[in-house]
Image: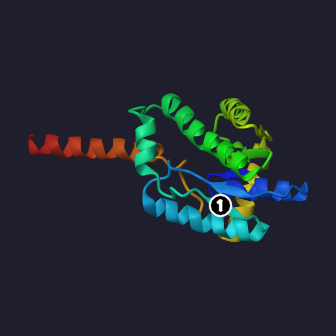
Amino acid sequence: MIHICCGPCLAYPADVLKKQGVDAVGYFYNPNIHPFTELEKRLEALKTVAETYGLPVIHDEEIYGLETWLVEMGGRFKVDERCPVCYRMRVEKAAKKAAELGVPYYTTTLLYSRYQRHGLIREIGDEAGRRYGVVFYYQDFRSGWNEGIAISKRLGIYRQPYCGCIFSEAERYAKRIKRLRGDFSARNQIAGL
C-alpha cells in the first residue's frame, strides 16, 4: 500500500513500482491540506495519475480533516515542531490501514519530495509498521524528481506550490507579505499615521 499525499508526488513512485511489478493499492489521507479548494485540485490530479497507472485508491473516510489536523498541531507553528506531527499522523494512519486490509508492506509518496525529512519519515514508518505488524518499505524516490515533474506536465495535472498546510502556504507568501507590510508602512508615513 502506498500512502499518497498528492498526484504529482505519486507519478514517479507509481511508475517505478509498476516497472518493479509491485501490485499496489493507494491510500489517500491528508488532513493537512487546506483550503478545501486546494484539496479538490489535488484529488483531481490524483485521479488522473491513479487512472494512468491502474492504481486503485482508497480515500480515508475523513476526506477533509481541518479540525483533526488543527487539534493534532496543538499550537505547533514552526516547521521543526509541526512537520513531525503531521508525518506521524499520516504515516501511522497508513500503517493501520495496511494492517486492516492485510497488506504486508506500505510506503508513502512523501519519500518522493526533496523537501521532506526522509530520515524522520523512515523512523516514523518503521515504528508504525512495528506497532501495526506491517513492514515500512523505504525507497528514496527523490532521484526521480525531474522525471516526476515531466510525467505531471505530460498528464497536464495540477502541481501544487506548497505542502498543503496553512502554515506552509503562509510561508510561501512570506516575501509578498513583507512587501505589503512595507507598502502599508510607507503609505501610513505619507498619511502621517
* Left or right position of 52 against 113: right
35 w.r.t. 104: above or below: below
Name the foreground residue: 11 vs 29.
29
Q: Residue at horizontal 79%, vertical 57%?
A: 24
* Residue 58 occupies quadrant: bottom right
Q: Residue at horizontal 80%, vertical 41%?
A: 139
* Left or right position of 161 against 19: left
**Residue 19 visible within the image:** yes
* Left or right position of 176 against 42: left
**Residue 147 visible within the image:** no
Q: Residue at horizontal 30%, vertical 47%?
A: 180
Residue 17: give x, y in percent of width and height.
Answer: 84, 54
Image quarter where the C terminus lies is top left
* Residue 16 occupies quadrant: bottom right
Q: Residue furthest left?
A: 192
Residue 119: give x, y in percent of width and height.
Answer: 70, 30
Name the foreground residue: 138 vs 8.
138
115 w.r.t. 53: above or below: above
Q: Which residue is mark 1?
A: 58
| Total numbered labels | 1
**Amino acid type assigned to the residue bearing label 1 in the image:** Ile
**Mark 1 residue crowding within 10 angstroms, few (<14) / some (14–19) / many (20+):** some
Q: Secondary structure at mark 1?
A: strand
